[in-house]
Image (cartoon, rainbow, N blue to C red):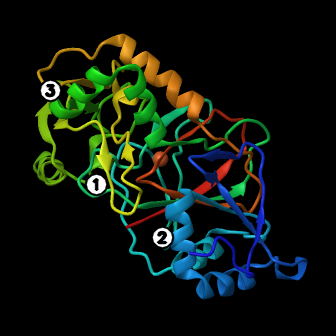
Amino acid sequence: MEPFTKDFKVGECEGQKVVDGETMPLVLQPPAPENNDVESLILALQKNKDWFDQMLLKNSAILLRGFNVQNAEEFNDIIETFGWDDIRYVGPAPRTHVHKRVWTANEGPLSEFIYYHHEMVLIKEYPKKVILFCEIPPPEGGQTPFVPSFRVTERMLEEFPEAVEELDAGGLKYTFTAPSKNSTGSMRGRGWEDTFAASDRAEAEKKANALGMDVEWLSDGGIKTILGPRSLTKVFEGRKGRRMWFNTMVGMHGKENSSALMADGTEIPAELVNRCEQIIEEESIQFKWEKGDVLFLDNLALLHGRRPSLAPRRVLVATCK
Ligand SMILES: [Fe+2]
């Protein structure tokens, strides 16, 4: 596959890294100043659909910059160019539907750091692609850093070869609790009614089971979901046999409303979790959002998160199969 096409100019961005020979993110810009509009972009994408797909697989992240993408409608038109199927978000993040396939990204307080994750990592069917559009760039902070997942596995294996293989083989068990939307005093997270788009317990239980989770009801009306054991790493087709760090150990370990434990229910050694957190941070790639940026992430190869930010910040998202 040719690394370049005449329909795009390859650019650069702050924070870009070369990982295992690939530039992340690959920055694609208009080939000439007069092509800096969405219509030209869509024509270029239509012509280079297969190429784009290959480049996304190769580089794991592509940033389209300089095309003056203005709003959710235009963002949706860009996504629909590819013909990828939509996949509906399931999870704890508060999101609002904006237009067709476009939703707001996490609407949790901007002061919070949303920890690195593969989108919907614990659910049976997760999106292959997470696509983000920056409508309003934050005045400060608010980056969407991402992390080559295979680098985390490689570095963890260098430092804890036996423990990591053991955890991978035995798997991790996760729990997650969500209040009821009728519970009082719950400020964090959404109620289980919204998480599972369910109006009663039976429906929530059925949906949780379908996603591969067991359910316990709590005395305050909340729900506790139990998952696993799940392996620590995964290898996906077409990705050079790389072992992805496809788990949420650091994100869920020892938190107020979640846990990540060994398969037998014992604690994962704190040293391992803490070191993993450092490695993920060290391997992270971050760029500064510019208005109109569209970022494509290979969700099977990258973890992503959100840094705390000052208002206003508006980043929209679509997830595809
Ligand atoms: Fe996410």
In the image, 293 versus 5, the foreground residue is 5
| Disc 2 target residue | 101
Label 2 neighbour load within 10 Å: few <14, some 14-19, many 20+: many
| Disc 3 target residue | 263
Query: What amino acid is labelled 1 in the image?
Result: Ala
Q: Mark 2–mark 1 contact, CB under 8 Å?
A: no
Classify 295 as above or below 5.
Answer: above
The residue drawn where x is 36% and y is 53% is 241
Left or right: residue 136 versus residue 197 is: right
Left or right: residue 304 versus residue 110 is: left
The residue drawn where x is 74% and y is 50% is 137
- Tag 1's secondary structure? loop
Kindly indicate the quadrant of the structure image that contains residue 149. top left
Where is residue 199? Give x, y as percent. Answer: 22, 52
Q: Mark 2–mark 3 contact, CB under 8 Å?
A: no
> Which disc is residue 213 wearing?
none
Query: What amino acid is labelled 3 in the image?
Result: Ala
Q: CA distance from mark 2 to mark 3?
A: 37 Å
Question: Where, quadrant-wise, is the N terminus in this rendering?
Answer: bottom right
Q: Earlier in the sequence, mark 3 or mark 1?
A: 1
